[in-house]
Every structure is written in C-alpha cells, then in structure tokens.
Amino acid sequence: MKKIITLLTLLILITACDDGNVKVQSINFDAVPASSCGNIIYKLNSNEALILQITENTNAFANVPTATNAPVEYQINGYNHVVYRFYNGAVTSATICGSIPPATPAVTEEWVATAGTIQITTSANKTTNTTTNGTRITGYNHYIVLKNVTFSKPVGQQVYESFVFGNYTTAPTNAMAIGFNISNYLEQCSTSNVINNHSGSEALTLNIDPSLIASAITTPGSPRIGLISSTNNQLIYRLYAGIVNTTSLCGGTTPAILEEWIANDGVAGVSGIVEVTTDSNAPGVFFHHIHLKGVTLKKGTSDFYLADDYYLGDLLTN
C-alpha cells in the first residue's frame, strides 16, 4: 500500500511539471519599483513582468499634481494596455524595451487586461531644508491603481476590484537651482519698479511697492512691510532657456521661458511678506535690505515653499 501511495505521489508531481510551466495564481509586485522606456511602464520580479502602456495620451504621466480624490483616469482598451507575463528565465529591461526582443527568456504564461480603469494620482516629491524650512521639488510620484480590472488568462479570467500597480517616479521637467548671489546688489529696471536678482538662466523678480524703498533710514526693529499680491509686490521666479541679464529682464529680448512660478498672495502677519530695512553710509545713499518671509511659489497645481526668511538681497538707491 505504501508503495502505491508513493508511486501516485510521484505521478502527480511529474504530471504537474511535465510542461515546465508554473501556473500563476496571483500577481504581486508590491515591493518592486517601476521603470520605463518610452511610454511603457513596467515592473520586473525575477521571471515575472507587469507592463502598462498608455498610448491614448503621450502626456499621461505629466508632472502635474492631481486634485485631492480626483485621479486622472484611462480606460483599458485598444490604446491603453496592461499585461502580466511569466517567463522561463530571469527577465531584464532588455526583454521589455529592446527593439528586437531577445530569444530568451520566453513567455510561458500571459494575462492580458481586457477591461477596467487605470487611475493615476500624481504628487510632488519634496525635500525640506531643516534650517530655512524651504522646500524644493525633487520629482513627481505617480500612484497607479487598476479599478475593476479583468485579466484574460490561459484558462478563464481573473478579476480584481482594486489592483495596485504601484508608484512610478519622474524627474522634474527642468532643474531649478534657485541659486542667487546675494553678494551682488539687486538691480532695478530704469523705467519701472521691478527689481531682480539673476544668475545664469534664473531670475527672481519683484515688482516692489516704491514706498518700501523710500529714501529714509528705518528705525531699528521697525522695517517697512508689504504683502505680495498680483497687483503690488508681485514676485515671480523664472527659468529661461539661456542666460539673462538686467537689460533683457527690463524690456529686452529674453530666451524662452522654461518655468514660471508666481508667489501666492500674502496674508498679514502670516505669509507672503516683503520686509525692507534701510540704512545709509553717506548722504543721499541708501541701502535697502530686502527679505521675503513665508513665501510660497506656485505653477499650476505644483508649489514649493521658498523659506521662512529668504534674503533677496540689497538694493542701492541714491
């Protein structure tokens, strides 16, 4: 009897493995980071691959944060695909992204999504300066979830009410150093109240209220204070496609603008404050020390916090 049981067990094992394939019961890529090539987003886990491709919109993973509880949605159809593949060997990016797929490893099982919704929730990744509390955007995270997705399997179907594809990270569209030299005096346009600090292809401009730079020394501890707004003390950060200077920033021809971030309106005693202290070292000569406090700059749905106290620089008037 024992011999019969042993033979039956061996027969079952041999039968289960006689085609060299493993029958996949579920998909789990939770701990796997996502990569991309072109418009293909994929995850690799040893001999498994989870692949997503959206061709309906070439800008599906734009660096634009989505509103709360309002992900961008795409229907799985002839333009937007989700595929799971199981291979007979370790899979690499070359297997997914090569113009001519390698002969090995070979696909031994494939699940193709035939229906469902792709949801993408985008948020900005930020670092915080622990000294100034300023934030800078280092990239954007796209959290991908498949809703009510149906996979067609070699045998039957697999349905998920909610299937987490996971996070896919993109770099900022343009690198913003925001690195201005405060050892140089700020420059004011000769025909307006616009002052600027520029460095290379970056410029931070402030259309300052002229009363803040009056030709009078301020009392110690009592700076002049104004609030940022779209009509008064407007503050704008711009990144250009080439080098800029005061001539170009004050009405001349500038290179194309790559990034434009506009400061939020100020709130008295809270945020968006322009603070100016004025002193003098000679008759008729005034040094205006300009600080920006609690300023947040915004572009579309993205924003970053400049600093609790950002020293814009000194403006010399006479």
Image (cartoon, rainbow, N blue to C red):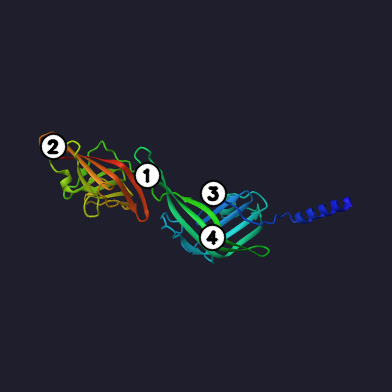
Residue 281, how many percent across, how many down? Answer: 14, 33
Q: Secondary structure at mark 4?
A: strand
- Mark 2 residue type: Val
Q: Which residue in the protein does label 4 denote?
A: 146
Q: Pointer 2 and pointer 3: residues touching (CB < 8 Å)?
A: no
Q: Residue furthest front?
A: 269
Q: Pointer 1 and pointer 3: residues touching (CB < 8 Å)?
A: no
Q: Pointer 1 and pointer 4: residues touching (CB < 8 Å)?
A: no
Q: Nearer the viewer, mark 3 or mark 4?
A: 4
Q: Which residue in the protein does label 2 denote?
A: 285
Q: Which residue in the protein does label 3 denote?
A: 33
- Mark 4 residue type: Leu
- Tell me if I can see residue 243 in this picture: no
Q: Secondary structure at mark 3?
A: loop
Q: Earlier in the sequence, mark 2 or mark 3?
A: 3
Cα gap from disc 1 to disc 4, whole angstroms: 32 Å
Residue 103, how many percent across, how many down? Answer: 65, 53
Q: Nearer the viewer, mark 2 or mark 4?
A: 4
Q: Which mark is residue 39?
A: none
Residue 83, how many percent across, how many down? Answer: 59, 59
In front of the other: 132 or 253 = 132
